């Protein structure tokens, strides 16, 4: 009996959990497992603000795939198109070589990219917080603004370099603003020519409330923490225009600013657009078993799929969170195995266990199992949750050690020169212009199959 070829696209929470479970439950004689991913690590995305703030090193949140996977073949590249009729995934390797990966069963878990809008200057001047490279770059950039502000005698230049804007009042934006504000406040003590009161952080969001998923009491508690630190929080406000040295808000204010960090939501990977399939708000429409109904042998999950949320009902779909993605990965693996063995598939059902928001230092708000926590208890729950969620013991040890070192020794505020003098546009980090059209996918698939 010929082995089935299982191809997983994406090495994030969903893809890694799926691959791990397939390795455990399928014998090598039953299936050949391949994983397409541009990086040989799973990014622990919830802790990116800690990387940007220097609390954690980049390696701490890059969980090695090769430590977690034993016999999965890792294809170093990104999927840029899928042709389900030919059962081919078109992959651009990290060398830019384009190859065809044939499959019998396809698991799509390509994740998401930063969601942007048609705002003048946004894609040219905004920085994201979605990839490890972006977090490392943002840290370098923020410290560079302090260096340059300290060195200049021009008051207008100094003012623009010491004002920072974060757009997005969700978890990512709130934690980013909170952690980076702590960074600049601590760093100012090392700059004799700078006054910490000159450094201003703005957090804005078009929504009327901060992190509404937490509920009003915890949302208000987080708002109080941010404002007590001097962060100006503006709700019901968005960005109208972004320039090299200023940001204009929709309420008419113009802020002298050279740093805008954009965390206003995510959109499904552009890979989904290469399939001729039904979507729900840009995410691939799937059944509760995570099957793509239009195509045989195709499953989709994670941020790129609109998986029905059976726990909520009423047509709701699961939010794009790491908690759901990891659990969907395990259920999807079970359903892949069931399909190979002609067994019934199981629907995905998971009730959210709670939310944690780390605001840096002793500040946090958490809601585990519906219990509202603030301050140190919330921080202990938040960091304990992150340690438990990390896949390898090595990663847990690195993160724990980094937290302890930062708490006791502080930061040296070193700028590494990452991407010095290079463009830092969103597409430079997320490669959103690398994907093929549907016609290009079919042409590539046929051409590559003919050669191979």
Image: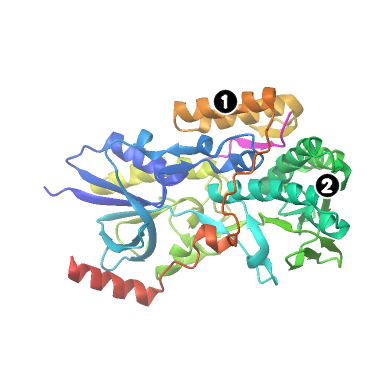
Q: How many marks?
A: 2
Q: The C terminus lies in which quarter of the figure?
A: bottom left
Q: Is residue 113 magenta?
A: no
Q: Residue furthest left?
A: 1
| Relative to 382, residue 446 above or below | below
Front residue of 12/62: it is: 62
Looking at the image, residue 310 sits to the left or right of residue 358; the answer is left
Locate residue 75, reporting x and y percent: 32, 51
Tell me the element at label 2: loop
The residue lying at 71 percent from left, 57 percent from top is: 260
Labels 2 and 1: the sequence-earlier one: 2
Q: Nearer the viewer, mark 2 or mark 1?
A: 2
Front residue of 425/287: it is: 425
Tell me the CA gap for discs 2 and 1. Answer: 30 Å
Which region of the structure is painted magenta?
348-361
Q: Is residue 349 magenta?
A: yes
Q: Which residue is mark 2?
A: 199
Around disc 2, counting alpha carbons within 10 Å, would you say few (fewer than 14), some (14 to 19), or many (20 or more)? many
| Relative to 354, residue 154 above or below | below
Q: Quadrant of residue 246?
A: bottom right
Front residue of 313/172: it is: 172
Locate residue 425, reporting x and y percent: 60, 62
Q: Which residue is mark 1?
A: 400
Looking at the image, residue 365 sits to the left or right of residue 296; the answer is right
Q: Main secondary structure of the magenta part?
A: loop
Q: Quadrant of residue 393?
A: top left
Q: Quadrant of residue 278?
A: bottom left
């Amino acid at each position: 009996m010929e082995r089935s070829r299982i191809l997983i696209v994406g090495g994030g929470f969903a893809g890694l959990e799926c691959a791990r479970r397939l390795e455990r439950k399928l014998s090598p004689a039953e299936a050949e497992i391949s994983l397409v991913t541009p990086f040989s690590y799973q990014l622990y995305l919830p802790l990116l603000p800690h990387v940007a703030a220097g609390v954690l090193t980049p390696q701490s949140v890059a969980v090695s795939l090769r430590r977690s996977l034993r016999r999965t073949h890792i294809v170093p590249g990104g999927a840029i198109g899928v042709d389900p009729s030919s059962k081919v995934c078109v992959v651009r390797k990290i060398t830019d070589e384009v190859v065809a990966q044939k499959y019998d069963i396809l698991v799509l878990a390509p994740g998401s990219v930063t969601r942007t809008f048609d705002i003048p200057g946004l894609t040219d001047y905004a920085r994201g917080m979605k990839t490890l490279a972006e977090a490392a770059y943002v840290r370098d950039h923020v410290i560079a603004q302090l260096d340059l502000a300290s060195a200049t005698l021009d008051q207008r230049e100094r003012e623009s370099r010491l004002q920072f804007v974060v757009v997005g009042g969700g978890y990512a934006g709130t934690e980013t603003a909170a952690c980076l504000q702590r960074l600049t406040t601590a760093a100012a003590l090392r700059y004799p020519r700078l006054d910490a009161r000159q450094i201003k952080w703005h957090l804005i969001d078009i929504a009327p409330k901060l992190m509404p998923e937490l509920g009003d009491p915890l949302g208000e508690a987080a708002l109080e923490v941010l404002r007590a630190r001097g962060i100006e929080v503006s709700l019901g406000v968005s960005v109208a225009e972004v320039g090299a040295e200023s940001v204009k808000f929709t309420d008419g204010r113009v802020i002298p600013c050279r740093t805008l960090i954009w965390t206003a939501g995510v959109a499904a990977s552009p890979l989904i657009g290469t399939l001729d399939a039904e979507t729900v708000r840009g995410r691939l429409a799937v059944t509760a078993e995570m099957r793509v109904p239009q195509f045989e042998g195709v499953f989709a999950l994670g941020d790129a799929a609109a998986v029905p949320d059976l726990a909520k009902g009423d047509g709701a779909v699961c939010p794009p969170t790491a908690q759901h993605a990891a659990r969907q990965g395990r259920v999807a693996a079970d359903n892949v195995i069931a399909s190979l063995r002609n067994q019934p598939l199981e629907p995905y059902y998971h009730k959210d266990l709670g939310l944690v928001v780390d605001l840096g230092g002793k500040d946090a708000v958490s809601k585990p199992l519906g219990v509202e926590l603030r301050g140190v208890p919330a921080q202990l729950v938040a960091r304990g949750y992150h340690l438990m969620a990390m896949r390898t013991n090595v990663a847990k040890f690195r993160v724990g050690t980094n937290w302890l070192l930062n708490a006791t020794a502080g930061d040296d505020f070193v700028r590494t020169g990452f991407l010095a003098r290079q463009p830092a546009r969103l597409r430079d980090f997320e490669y959103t212009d690398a994907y093929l059209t549907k016609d290009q996918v079919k042409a590539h698939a046929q051409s590559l199959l003919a050669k191979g």
